[in-house]
Amino acid sequence: MAYDTTILFRDDSYLKEIEATVLGINERGGILTDRTVFYATSGGQPGDTGVFVRADGSTVAIAATVTGETKEEIIHVLAPDQSIPAIGEKLRLRINWDRRYKLMRMHTACHLLSVVCPFPITGAAVGEDDSRVDFDLPEAGVTREGVTAKLMELVSANHPVFTRWITDEELAANPTLIKSKNVRPPIGTGRIRLVCIGKDASVDSQPCGGTHVATTGEVGMIHIGKIEKKGKENRRFRIRFGALPEGE
Ligand SMILES: [Zn+2]
């Protein structure tokens, strides 16, 4: 039977630490709790790392977070050689916030890139220092300087980023919301989470279950590291933190 973890990062991606109770331990040592702030690997964003703090103050290191039988079942994967908490034990769950915040900034930057480059997305991977988005785009016709400048315009405008839930029917009536060519949003659960950018979503809205920053200004300085050709019709854009290096 799948567990239904109360998922707190969906409504508040800034929660760093909460108290939770251990509900189960699976056959591979993965820990299930009643609630969590740990994001589980999904949609190109890696899962959280962090620690569980026990009542005596000792910590248990969490090396990864993944989903189980359903997207609502969150499994915390222990690092090697950790003591295993007991079922029923109360713990403080604390994510590695420095890492997560970078991932939130990068993930939001990927949304901004999809606004600047409005082409079908064939793949994406969010990383702490480097993210990539692949577009179905036969002729580049875009430069890293030009794309970087447009990205930084959206960052500087400090647009709000917020989420909104819509029904399957609303999504079906607005097919242009879906930018990914290969990945379909999870239709059938009755509701879909939209991530919106700008006042009244004037800049963008698309289905996404990841964690994002609250304003585009928080993304900070970013640039396009490289535009690589991946096959005849694919261009891979790499996003990095910091200003565009000069003289490359
Ligand atoms: Zn997203």
Image (cartoon, helix red, strand yellow):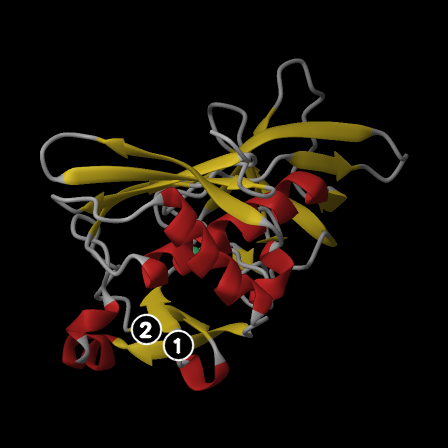
Residue 98, position as x, y percentages in the image: 70, 41
Residue 67, position as x, y percentages in the image: 42, 42
Q: Are dots 1 and 2 in contact, CB under 8 Å? A: yes
Residue topped by disc 1 = 165
Give the quadrant of residue 160: bottom right
Residue 67 vs residue 146, the one in the foreground: 146
Q: Taking the image as drawn, is residue 40 in sight?
A: no
Question: Which residue does the image show at 19% across and 71% down from the upper left?
Answer: 176
Residue 238, position as x, y percentages in the image: 40, 37
Question: Which residue does the image show at 26% across and 59% down from the upper left?
Answer: 186
Asked if residue 146 is positioned above or below residue 44 in the image, the reply reads below
Question: Which residue does the image show at 16% across and 76% down from the upper left?
Answer: 172
Farthest front residue in view = 247
1 vs 2, front mark:
1
**Residue type (three-letter) at the residue carrying disc 2:** Arg
Q: CA distance from mark 1 to mark 2?
A: 6 Å
Number of marks present in the image shown: 2
Residue 127 vs residue 76, the one in the foreground: 127
Asked if residue 205 is positioned above or below residue 131 in the image, the reply reads below
Disc assigned to residue 191: 2
166 left or right of 99? left
Q: Provide the secondary structure element on which disc 1 rests.
A: strand
Residue 52, position as x, y percentages in the image: 73, 37
Q: Badge 2, how many Cα within 10 Å: few under 14, some, many 20+?
A: some
30 left or right of 97? left
**Residue type (three-letter) at the residue carrying disc 1:** Trp
Ranked by sequence position, the earlier of labels 1 and 2 is: 1
